[in-house]
Image (tube, helix red, strand yellow):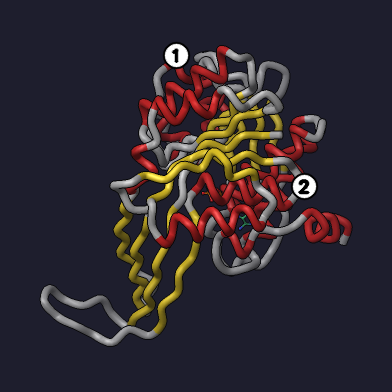
Amino acid sequence: TILVLGSFMMDHVVTTKRAPKNGETIVGKQFEIFPGGKGANQAVAASRLGLNVIMAGKVGSDYYGDVFINLLEKEGIDVRHIVKDKDKSTGVGFVTVEENGDNRIIVVLGANLSYDSQDLSELVVDIAPVTLAMFQLEMDFDLTEEAINVFYQKQIPVLLNPAPARTLSNDLLSKVTYLTPNESELELLTGYQLKNMQDVIEAAKSLLDKGTENVIVTLGDKGALIVNKELVELVDGYTVEAVDTVAAGDAFNGAFAYAISSGYEIIQAVKFANAVGALTITKKGAIPSIPTYEEVQSFIDQ
Ligand code: ADP
């Protein structure tokens, strides 16, 4: 069983020829609603592959809060630790996509930000079966730090996907078992300018020096790089036709958690996660595009 402590975001996407000017009303082309949020995406990815997943986090006492809880429950995820905030709305995103591909985005993190120490202490008494705890950076940062500390003290391995990008203290980095930045997150974390693979390796090594056990840098179509004390290994990605790259990183993280928890060696786990990341970009949307274990197996076998 793994725990994902993370975010819920309901994205509202309008496609339009052009964005309206101030005070103007225009007629758009299409409207769609996509459930997502890095936490929810990663929980669904791990669960679809067959892992037992407990998802913890906060939604509003509103329509979308119920939508998320029902959706995750249907995926077979343990939702007993998703709490509802009385005052704040469920996290939402509003996205305008123009014909030329330009986009404008407003996100309201809402209830995601009000998950607090009290919620955490209620969660912690009920985590006996958890063998890996996963985090991202879409909740209150102090709370996330506090949570990582708690799991570190309990000697439960911590996977931190440091997204959206920000810097982290050396103390926090030293408590992370698996850190999974993409290239731009790695740049921000380390202050390195990444011009080639050697730079990526050096930057990742600088995080090992701060005490992180394993750094796994996701590299888009190039796959992912593993750096730890024994290993510097570039694990090639799969070649697919990209339809929508949304949630590739989340699917990668959920799949990596699945594979490591199932006893894969780290190289094999990253190879598997590369397959899941690649498959996810062949379909539109976040949660709808995340594959099942059977789909991944037949993709790998072909
Ligand atoms: P993020 O989406 O967080 O920016 P990446 O772009 O590095 O992260 O993608 C995460 C993982 O998804 C990659 O490590 C890789 O396994 C897979 N992936 C992403 N883009 C592609 C692609 N164009 N072709 C094949 N695999 C991809």
Q: Is mark 2 within 8 Å of ligand 1?
A: no
The label number, if any, that marks residue 171 in the structure image:
1
Residue sticking out furthest to the left: 23
* Quarter of the image that includes the N terminus: top right
Residue at the spot 55% in from the left edge and 60% down from the top edge? 286
Query: What x and y, as percent, mark residue 214?
Result: 63, 24
Q: Residue at x 56, y 51 (%)?
A: 41
Q: Number of callouts in the render?
A: 2
Please, what is the three-letter code of the amino acid marked with disc 2?
Answer: Gly
Label 1 with label 2: CB-CB less than 8 Å: no
Residue 81 in view, yes or no: yes
Q: Secondary structure at mark 1?
A: helix
Other residues around mark 2 within 10 Å, as few (<14) / some (14–19) / many (≥20): some
Q: Which mark is residue 50?
A: 2
The answer to whether residue 272 is left or right of residue 140 is: right
How far apart marks 1 and 2 lie (CA) works out to 33 Å
In the rendering, at what x and y percent does residue 263 appear? 82, 31
Q: Is residue 61 above or below residue 234?
A: below
**Closer to us: 238 or 156:** 156
Residue 77, placed above or below residue 15: above
Q: Residue at x 80, y 35 (%)?
A: 262
Q: Which mark is residue 79?
A: none
